[in-house]
């Protein structure tokens, strides 16, 4: 893709717009970036087209300040809130004995044709899980291979037509046209997982403001995605309600004092002053222990819902390299340790997206995972074959095809290097790398049954309100 791209992540806290294009040497060149507070977007869906459109327009106009380049293509994130995933398969004959892009396209279209798509849903992705040539073992890339029959097994992501139409309408109102949709959690996985994680299997969990989106990879392919309508804003709401404090104060308490690792002893007698809702001249004292209990309850809930969803889908057992958590809420201290408990001691990592260097915005932040994924999805040189939301074949670049003597791994690392991308290193170590000897602190408070009962009581009260 040598067009000038506008990528937009429609988050419920922020809308992020990035204008970028590939240089002649296929490096991703960021031309402009903009972020604007979201409005009219809730739990992954557009709830007010006019307000959403204004936020989109603002984010894009900030990004446009940095460049005069004409936008030629627009790619937008789609929440798993209104998607359904399904499996299918297809097979085609190879008339000349040599598999070209033509046959690859045909077999993917055939797998899509064979799938039962619900009428009110539209296709967003058709991703090959594996190819087979003449019943031979799994083939990752069938291009230029010889055979008489090509088969494919695919994972198809579909989205509710009405939800996509609402997004298109909001963009239209902002004088923009959507050319391509990409599933949020798929984009996140693309920006977060390294080659090993993709190959041996991992689940990426994007903990956002009002949504939790997750995607599972195995054998270098997307194999499952899911969604929970709970995010970090729910913690803020809980704190606001339970502490009788305004949401702004509750948000501050969450980000400044939220810490799931502090022990009873560390928290003993520690209190913070919080303004009272409706009576802001006065404040009340709240114990840090109580704050921790409220936060813990919500985080435990969302992670447990993800685990249960994965268990129900049968994916849980084959997660390979484990769980990778990202998104704004992943900044909460102790979330890794809590997730380790909830996911039955599977390896858990907190990761930032690959950091595409540019002079405008740092991508070195977990809340940037989706936008970086959109850029890599659209501009990265070494992509796998798949069908996009227009049912068009995404092709591998010539730059890769010419390098016939190189291994895939070499090509992959070169394309990453070419894109001038640096894997983010946090706290002096790559958070994407498993660390068996990680002397992670244990959560001192989580295993206490008595606290759990208290949490449950609070919880019942809170869930009645939200
Ligand atoms: N230290 C922290 N602890 C808990 N939550 C945090 C922390 N720092 C930021 N957050 C939360 O992260 C959220 C923003 O994350 P992100 O940008 O990933 O969400 P989003 O993409 O806008 O929302 P969504 O994906 O749900 O539509 C906010 O709710 C913010 O309060
Ligand atoms: Mg998000």
Image (tube, rainbow, N blue to C red):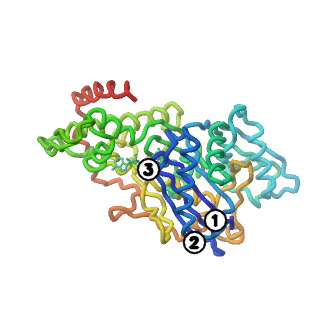
Check residue 322 in the rendering and tell me which mark sits there, or answer none.
none
The residue to which callout 2 is attached is: 418
How far is mark 2 from mark 3, CA to CA? 26 Å
How far is mark 1 from mark 3, CA to CA? 25 Å
Q: Is residue 206 above or below residue 28?
A: above
Between residues 22 and 261, which one lies in front from this camera angle? 22
**Which quadrant of the view contains residue 445?**
top left
Mark 2 or mark 1, earlier in chain: 1
Mark 2 or mark 3, earlier in chain: 3
Q: Confirm or deny contact between disc 2 and disc 3 (CB under 8 A).
A: no
In the orientation shown, which residue stands out farthest toward the left?
269
The residue to which callout 1 is attached is: 381
Task: Mark 3 and ligand 1: say if the CB distance to the nearest ligand atom is below 8 Å.
Answer: yes
Q: Residues within 10 Å of mark 2 (few under 14, many from 20)?
A: some
Secondary structure of the residue carrying numbered label 3: loop
Between residues 95 and 125, which one lies in front from this camera angle? 125
Q: Is residue 229 above or below residue 361?
A: above
**Which quadrant of the view contains residue 270?**
top left
Secondary structure of the residue carrying numbered label 2: helix
Residue at left offset 32%, top offset 25%: 461
- Closer to viewer: mark 2 or mark 3: 3
Residue at left offset 75%, top offset 50%: 133
The residue to which callout 3 is attached is: 327
How far is mark 2 from mark 1, CA to CA? 9 Å
Mark 1 or mark 3, earlier in chain: 3
The answer to whether one can see residue 409 in this image is yes
**Which quadrant of the view contains residue 380?**
bottom right
x then y, percent, for residue 332: 33, 48
Between residues 199 and 348, which one lies in front from this camera angle? 348
x then y, percent, for residue 208: 44, 45
């Amino acid at each position: 893709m040598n067009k000038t791209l506008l990528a937009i992540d429609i988050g419920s806290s922020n809308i992020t717009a990035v204008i970028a294009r590939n240089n002649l040497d296929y490096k991703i060149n960021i031309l402009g970036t903009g972020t604007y507070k979201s409005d009219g977007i809730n739990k992954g869906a557009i709830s007010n087209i006019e307000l959403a459109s204004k936020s989109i327009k603002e984010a894009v106009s900030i990004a446009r300040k940095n460049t005069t380049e004409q936008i030629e293509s627009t790619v937008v994130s789609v929440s798993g809130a209104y998607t359904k995933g399904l499996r299918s398969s297809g097979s085609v004959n190879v008339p000349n004995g040599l598999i070209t892009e033509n046959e690859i396209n045909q077999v993917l279209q055939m797998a899509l044709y064979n799938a039962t798509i619900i009428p009110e849903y539209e296709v967003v992705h058709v991703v090959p899980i594996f190819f087979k040539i003449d019943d031979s073992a799994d083939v990752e890339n069938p291009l230029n291979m010889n055979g008489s029959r090509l088969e494919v097994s695919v994972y198809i992501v579909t989205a509710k037509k009405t939800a996509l139409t609402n997004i298109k309408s909001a963009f239209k109102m902002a004088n923009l046209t959507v050319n391509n949709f990409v599933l949020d959690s798929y984009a996140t996985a693309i920006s977060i997982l390294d080659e090993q994680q993709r190959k041996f299997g991992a689940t990426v969990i994007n903990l956002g403001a009002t949504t939790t989106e997750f995607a599972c990879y195995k054998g270098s392919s997307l194999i499952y995605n899911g969604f929970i309508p709970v995010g970090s804003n729910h913690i803020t709401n809980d704190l606001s309600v339970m502490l009788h404090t305004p949401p702004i104060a509750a948000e501050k308490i969450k980000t400044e004092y939220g810490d799931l690792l502090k022990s009873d002893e560390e928290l003993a007698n520690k209190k913070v002053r919080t303004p009272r809702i409706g009576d802001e001249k006065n404040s009340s004292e709240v114990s840090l222990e109580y704050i921790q209990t409220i936060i813990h309850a919500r985080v435990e809930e969302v992670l447990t819902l993800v685990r249960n969803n994965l268990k129900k889908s049968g994916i849980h057992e084959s997660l390979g390299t484990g769980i990778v958590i990202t998104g704004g809420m992943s900044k909460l201290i102790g979330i890794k340790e809590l997730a380790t408990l909830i996911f039955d001691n599977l390896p858990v990592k907190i990761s930032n997206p690959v950091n595409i260097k540019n002079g405008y915005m740092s991508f070195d932040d977990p809340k940037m995972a989706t936008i970086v994924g959109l850029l890599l999805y659209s501009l990265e040189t070494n992509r796998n074959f798949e069908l996009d939301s227009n049912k068009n074949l995404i092709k591998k670049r010539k730059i890769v095809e010419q390098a016939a003597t190189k291994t895939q791994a070499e090509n992959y690392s070169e394309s990453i290097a070419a894109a001038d991308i640096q894997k983010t290193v946090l706290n002096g170590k790559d958070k994407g790398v498993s660390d068996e000897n990680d002397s992670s602190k244990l959560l001192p408070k989580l295993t206490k049954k008595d606290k759990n009962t208290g949490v449950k009581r609070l919880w019942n009260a809170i869930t009645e309100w939200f």
